[in-house]
Amino acid sequence: MKNIKAIIFDAYGTLFDVNSAAEKCKNKIGNKWEAFANYWRTTQLEYTWLRSLMDRHKDFWQITEDSLDKSIKAFNIDVLMREELLNLYKVLSPFKEVPETLKTLKEKKFKLSILSNGTPSLLNELVKSNNLDSFFDDIFSIEEVGVYKPNAKVYDIPIKKYNIKKNEVVFLSANTWDVSGGGNYGYEAIWVNRNNNIFDILDYKPKNQIQSLKGLLDIIK
């Protein structure tokens, strides 16, 4: 880890709680809110992969809307909640340890950035609404290459911008497929395993896994 020049974070599920939009509406949705939130997220990811394979790109916000529409039908949610859920998705809550961890890393003079499926405007609004914008040197979106993670073109974006080697990047994600994507590309990929899940078998096994971003501070001195 001594030669690390950049620390790059996935956004959704890693820095920001993707279930927080539905959680804020749980009194209206009822006890099925968590299953609904998970279904929305899974459908959203499936649509990114399928559209990449079909070469029929839509940006992440359009996919978020499409996956929500399917989820509303699947769970028989009042369609009048659609706009409320979408507005809440734009201001997802960060996990509680995120601000302090980013502050500490910034004080250590690490270059910090986000590499995400999200659109630039969506990511900028998300970061600013949570007062995190001062911590990041760059916010990279897959829209620069028009294909979703885990395509190697995505992981190549910061390498070209910073003109550094792949193994000089620490990449963190809570999504096992994303960790595998970054790790197979050549990053030093770390899994943020918040829920004690099982890692996917995708030709990469991370050297380090942590339960929250605070664990990164024990790895990077």
Image: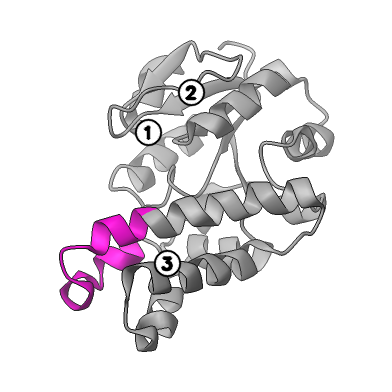
**Mark closest to the chain's N terminus, 2 or 1:** 2
- Residue type at mark 1? Leu
**Mark closest to the chain's N terminus, 3 or 1:** 3
Q: Secondary structure at mark 1?
A: helix
Helix, strand or loop: magenta stretch: helix
Which label lies toward us, 2 or 1?
2
Task: Identify the residue under disc 1.
Answer: 213
Q: In the rendered view, would you say 83 is above or below 123?
A: below
Task: Identify the residue under disc 3.
Answer: 71
Direction from residue 78 to residue 116 in the image, left or right = right
Q: How many marks?
A: 3
Asked whether the beta carbons under mark 3 and mark 1 sit within 8 Å of each other, the answer is no
Residue 64 location (% of width, % of height):
55, 65
Task: Identify the residue under disc 2.
Answer: 200
Q: In the rendered view, would you say 113 is above or below 199?
A: below
Which of the two residues, 75 or 206, is positioned nearer the viewer here?
75
Direction from residue 46 to residue 142 in the image, left or right = right
Which of the two residues, 42 or 18, is positioned nearer the viewer here?
42
**Mark closest to the chain's N terminus, 2 or 3:** 3
Residue 16 location (% of width, % of height):
41, 52
29 part of magenta stretch: yes
Is residue 149 at all visible to an observer of this figure?
A: yes
Residue 201 location (% of width, % of height):
52, 18
Residue shown at 48% from the left, 69% from the top: 70
